[in-house]
Image (spheres, rainbow, N blue to C red):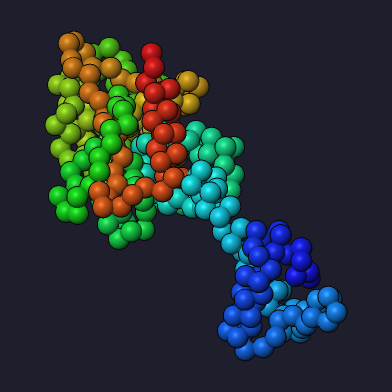
């Protein structure tokens, strides 16, 4: 409220400030300030203008701060998908790190099959998804990032008949988290063991319980049931003789045309770090 101090603070001449205010008053179609013997007061229109202007400036400051926090992956939202296998092995560790590092960064996670995740990716509902490497359509073009590999395992309860010496000829129900086709990748010594009817359940809590409670054989990775193995509730059936270990390639898929948000890039690094921790000897 001073035509002397205001120009000094703004780095303007008094005449330049006066012209600016006059131009603004013409645009607002009313007086913003009353001057009387060196005294300056806001008119009712001027007070209303200042109140709105202060709110706009505060909003602008908030917007700048919010955009900076989003760019630093401290807030916002990341929507992504993940198949049941990597979800069971990786998701708790990765999200717990995210919750500690950036509690205001919201996550929306869909645990589905690769077919369901692909449709959600192309529809723009998720930024990326993580799954075992599989066949995806050529269009639209995708960005593929290999995160690492899981060992493929054949898992049963303690005391399962298949664990007895020379008892690999019987057939048992097979548990899977997704459609694995004809299981052509199974070593010869376990072909009979995994020749029974397939039961697909996209929930590893249920798969683990069924493995513990029945004679079904879970074809998955030991990484998905590491706690049950450590507790002695599930055991691995190893192929006999010489065989080439089988691995499951874990991959991250995103659309080539869409840039990942800062939060998604942070989560990608977290998944990569957790994969390295799992696969270290």
Could you say which is closer to the camera, residue 27 or residue 172? 27
> Where residue 123 appears, x then y in whole percent?
30, 60
Could you say which is closer to the camera, residue 152 or residue 30? 30
Q: Quadrant of the N terminus?
A: bottom right
Residue 60 is left or right of residue 210, and the answer is right
Task: Give the residue drawn at x 75%, y 70%.
Answer: 3
> Where residue 272 appears, x then y in whole percent?
38, 30
Task: Give the residue drawn at x 58%, y 84%.
Answer: 27
Could you say which is closer to the camera, residue 174 or residue 111? 111
Q: Is residue 204 visible?
A: no
> Where residue 127 appears, x then y in whole percent?
36, 51
Q: Is residue 203 above or below residue 232?
A: below
Task: Give the residue drawn at x 17%, y 40%.
Answer: 181
> Where residue 202 appears, x then y in whole percent?
36, 45
Q: Is residue 163 above or below residue 25?
A: above
Numbered marks: total: 0
């Amino acid at each position: 409220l001073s035509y002397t101090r205001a120009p000094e603070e703004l780095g303007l001449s008094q005449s330049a400030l006066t012209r600016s205010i006059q131009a603004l008053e013409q645009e607002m179609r009313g007086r913003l300030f009353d001057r009387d013997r060196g005294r300056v007061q806001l008119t009712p229109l001027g007070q209303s203008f200042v109140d709105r202007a202060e709110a706009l400036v505060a909003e602008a400051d908030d917007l700048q701060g919010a955009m900076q926090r989003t760019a630093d992956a401290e807030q916002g939202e990341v929507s992504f998908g993940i198949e049941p296998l990597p979800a069971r092995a990786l998701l708790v560790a990765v999200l717990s790190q995210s919750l500690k590092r950036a509690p205001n960064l919201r996550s929306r996670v869909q645990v589905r099959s690769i077919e369901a995740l692909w449709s959600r990716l192309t529809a723009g509902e998720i930024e990326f998804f993580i799954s075992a490497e599989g066949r995806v359509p050529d269009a639209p073009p995708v960005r593929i990032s290999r995160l690492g590999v899981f060992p493929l395992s054949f898992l049963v309860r303690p005391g399962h008949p298949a664990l007895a010496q020379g008892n690999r000829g019987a057939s048992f129900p097979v548990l899977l988290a997704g459609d694995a086709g004809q299981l052509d990748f199974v070593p010869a010594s376990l072909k009979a063991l995994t020749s029974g009817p397939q039961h697909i359940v996209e929930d590893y809590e249920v798969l683990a319980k069924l493995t513990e409670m029945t004679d079904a054989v879970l074809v998955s990775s030991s990484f998905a049931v590491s706690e049950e193995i450590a507790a002695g509730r599930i055991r691995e059936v190893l192929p006999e003789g010489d065989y080439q270990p089988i691995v499951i390639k874990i991959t991250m898929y995103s659309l080539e045309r869409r840039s990942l948000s800062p939060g998604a890039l942070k989560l990608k690094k977290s998944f990569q770090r957790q994969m390295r921790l799992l696969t270290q000897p």
